[in-house]
Structure formats: C-alpha cells, structure tokens
Image (cartoon, rainbow, N blue to C red):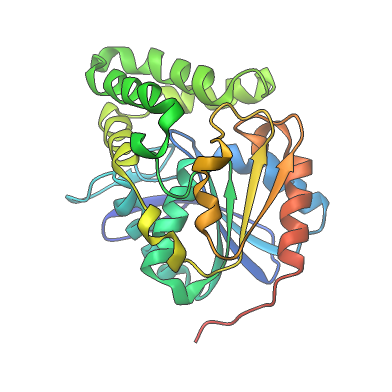
Amino acid sequence: MIFVELEHSRLHVVPFGKGHRKVLAIPGWLEPLDSFFPLSEAFEQNAADLRLCLVDLPGIGASTRRGARGFSLRDYAQDLWELIDELQWGSLTLMGHSLGGTIACTMALMRPEQIQSLILIDSQPGGASPDLWPKDKETLERLCETVQTLPEKAFPRMLPRLMHQGLIGNHVEASLWQKLRPIVAAIPPQVARETIASLVKTNLQPYLGEITAPTLDVLGTEDPLRMPPEYDLLLRLPHCQRREIPGAGHTPLLDAPEALAASITDFLTHLPTRVAA
C-alpha cells in the first residue's frame, strides 16, 4: 500500500497510468477507492492519456484521520488539496462520484485557478440539502436520522445494507459488491454520521455560477437519485455538458465502466492542456 502522510490525515492512494493529464478520483459516500478500480482498468484498456490518483477519504478504507479535523465535506476538500500540494500536481482534473462530486465542486470554489476540468458522475454539485431535493426531501431527512440514531453495534450490519439498497441496487455484479461490503462494514460510526450530516447541510447553489472550468456531468439513466429537470442544479454551471449511460444506475463506475470511460476519455481529449503557474 502507498500512504501519503499529511498534517491532518494519513491517506491511502493508488496511482493508475502515466499519462499527461492528472486526474484525482474522489469516491462517494461510504465508498473506498476500490470503487474506481473497474473504471481505472477501462481507462487502461482504452490507452487513455491519464495519470489517475485514487484515494480513500479519511476514515474510510485504509486512510485515517489525525488531529482535531472532522469528516465534513469541507474537511475532506482541505485534505485533498493538501494531498495535491504534496504530490506537486499544480493544475488538474477533479473526478467525483455522488458525494465526491460535491466535494469536487467545493474544491473548485476554493482554488479555481488550479482546476482544468470537473467530471461529476451521478452527482449533485449543489449538495444534498433537502430543500434542493423536493421530491426526495423526506427520504433524505429519514436517512440522516437513521444514521444519527443507529446504535453503534448495528453499524457493521446496517451500513452495507443502506449503501446497497439505497445507492448500488441490483445494477452491480454480486462479486464486485462482495469485495466492497466488508470495507463499508468497517467504517466507524462517527465517519458515517458526520459525512451524511454535512452532505444534507450543504447548499452550494448560490455559488455554482462561479465554477467556470469545463465540466462533464455523467448520469446513469436508471439512477434513482436523479433530479427532475426543473430542479437540476447542473443547469447553473456555465460550462457543463451532459452525457448519459444507458441502463446504468447510480454507480456507472461499477456497472458500466467501459461506457463511462469512453465518455470521459472523449471529453478530456477535446480539452486544452493547461499548466499551472
């Protein structure tokens, strides 16, 4: 395993590829970096000119927290900028799945000059404040309450169930889910509670217009968390294009990695290469 030692965290990272375009892959809620393995392998098969860095967020997988910093989305954004500084990457592309896309947008607002592009995979860039999700407001509030009130001894059993039933569903092969399940079961209750509480408090809607980097929004057509067009915050991103993955659910990086890799590679191929000052 490769670890990067930072002031507030010890991050487990896995590099993929030796291309010119640097891409940091940010997992979704409760997801380890392993969730990006099928997509990373699809990039390699396509001979994509990428240098990927997969990372476990603190408290998930093999990454750990140190010091007083917590597990909010902004805490994670600060961790990842510290990782980027340590890697001396300069400008880069941020690729986030679900909650990871909200973290990516938070990072883009913090240091817009370093963002070459954003890739949001079945994500809601504005956050998951119930006010932004009118049709799912009760579901989000109930999910947050369930996680906050769940007895600690029940977390190893219930967290995988919540993730599988609410996010992954039956679109992902059973063998892939069996690899992820024990990692999800080992997530500490504090991490699950703080991250979901932070997500449902996050509302970036007033600031999305400040994100000027080229953005790719990729959606699975069968994603149960997809917002209706009238509430679609991606319409507020000034340089965003959308592509859909037919038949994919909320996790196309697991259930349709080849199609997802093709869409991302095409998007990145047509971007100019920027070098940070």
Which residue appears farthest toward the right when viewing the image? Answer: 46
Q: Residue at x 46, y 55 (%)?
A: 104
Q: Position of residue 157 (x, y in %)?
A: 40, 13
Near-viewer residue (82 or 277): 277
Q: Quadrant of residue 244?
A: top right
User: Is residue 50 something one can see in this rendering?
Assistant: yes
Near-viewer residue (164 or 218): 218
Q: Residue at x 37, y 53 (%)?
A: 204
Asked if residue 68 is positioned above or below residue 98 in the image, the reply reads: below
Q: Position of residue 60 (x, y in %)?
A: 40, 37
Q: Position of residue 182 (x, y in %)?
A: 48, 22
Q: Residue at x 67, y 77 (%)?
A: 273
Asked if residue 157 is positioned above or below residue 8 in the image, the reply reads: above
User: Is residue 83 something one can see in this rendering?
Assistant: no
Question: Along the horizontal axis of the image, is 143 left or right of 163?
Answer: left
Question: Along the horizontal axis of the image, is 88 left or right of 217?
Answer: left
Near-viewer residue (186 or 146): 146
Which residue appears farthest toward the left when viewing the image? Answer: 68
Question: Along the horizontal axis of the image, is 266 left or right of 29?
Answer: right
Q: Position of residue 255 (x, y in %)?
A: 70, 31
Asked if residue 273 is positioned above or below residue 34 in the image, the reply reads: below
| Total count of labels | 0
Which residue appears farthest toward the front when viewing the image? Answer: 230
Which residue appears farthest toward the bottom when viewing the image? Answer: 277
Asked if residue 210 is positioned above or below residue 42 in the image, the reply reads: below
Q: Quadrant of residue 210?
A: bottom left
Q: Residue at x 23, y 46 (%)?
A: 70
